[in-house]
Image: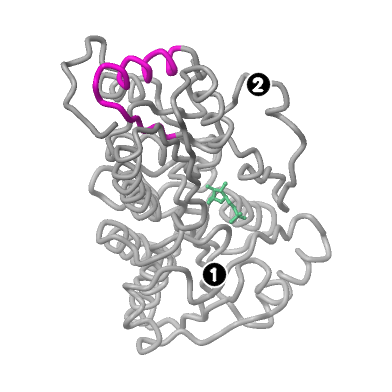
Amino acid sequence: MRVGILTGGGDCPGLNPAIRGATLRLIRDGHTPIGVLQGWKGLIEGLTVPLTEERVDEIIREGGTILGTSRTNPFKDPADVQRLLENIEDFNFGAIIAIGGEDTLGVARRLYTEHGVRVVGVPKTMDNDLGGTDFTFGFDSAVSVAVEAMDRLRDTAKSHARIIVLEVMGRHAGWVALYAGIGGGADWILIPEVPVDLNAMCHYLQQVYHGGKRYGLVVVSEGVELPFAGSDEPLQTDEFGHKVLKERAVGSRVARYIEEITGIETRDAVIGHIQRGGPPTVYDRVLATRLGLKAAELVSTGQFGMLAALHGVEIVAVPLEEALQAPKLVPYELYEEARQIFQRAVLQPQRSGAS
Ligand code: F6P
């Protein structure tokens, strides 16, 4: 069978290992894997490349996606859906493996339920906000970059006796901020799932700072709602209707607020797309490979409309319908668990720092 493989939505480390895993298993099962370029756009426009063992052999360590990606939504125009369906026939694709987040997989689900296209999904996103799977690949790599940024910011914050606010991506889920905050030892973490209490944060930062630490680190997720006038100004949207959250500049706004309230010199840093580039971590390489293998297995065994997913340490199949029911957000209990570290009730005597 000829099987199309595509990657859609924002790229993230792990896409290449997933393409590799799926390709190698498809070949092993006697199928012909074909790469579809630029996500759903490539299926609308008929852009394909052969996927061979040789082509995918070394991509395990490469960030990005050798197939390219786009945020194209075919369902915005019925003519595009028509062209896409025709191309599936013209290319004689017996199945499509779609590697993506909620948008790409949402299209896959509709193609399956509304048009009978034989699809299998693979979950990816640095945001880790997809239901049906414990983790998505791309997340671990993004958090590792954010933690490295925290380590670097700590050095400079400490030298200048400043507070530094790090803004990370994550859309409306705070996974990246929470993990980066725990892993990087933040003094406060702001995530979209928990209403922000800026006064409590400023009070705590003042205590920490004047208690002897003489610097502070805050992590804020781009999707946080701030209680300032103007924080909900209209924003650009993509083809799936998502706002470009980067424009809200929550990091710099939180930094200005902290400086105003505490009187402590405060800076902000935004790592943006740096979180999405670079080689995947080992965790992401393994997870993506296993998910790719599973997707190919689902094709070989005729289990369509399913998502390869991580449950504990097992890779299982979950209906796309079920996985896409609701985004996976940070549970309040997990944030509270982290709060024991970043908001210590009784501050310990502080170590001395530069002033
Ligand atoms: O969904 C992944 C993500 O990186 C989000 O965290 C972020 O809000 C968005 O994509 C950025 O999208 P773009 O690459 O289109 O600017």
Give the residue at the far front of this rendering.
355
Q: Nearer the viewer, mark 2 or mark 1?
A: 2
Q: Which mark is residue 228?
A: 2
Q: Which mark is residue 6?
A: 1
What residue sits 46% from the left and 35% below the top? 328
Percent position (x, y) of residue 79? 83, 65
What residue sits 33% from the left and 30% below the top? 215
State which tag comes first along the sequence, 2 or 1.
Answer: 1
User: Is 300 left or right of 74, judged from the image as shown?
Assistant: left
Please check the rendered image and state whether residue 353 is part of the magenta-colored stretch, yes or no: no
Percent position (x, y) of residue 103? 61, 51
Q: Is residue 198 above or below residue 267?
A: above
Percent position (x, y) of residue 148? 31, 51
Q: Secondary structure at mark 2?
A: loop
Foreground residue, 268 or 31? 268
Pointers 2 and 1 in contact (C-beta within 8 Å): no
Q: Is residue 59 above or below residue 311?
A: below
Q: Amino acid at mark 2?
A: Phe
Q: Is residue 176 above or below residue 89?
A: above
Foreground residue, 124 or 91? 124
Q: Amino acid at mark 1?
A: Leu
Span shown in magenta: 200-219
Screen quadrant of the C terminus: top left
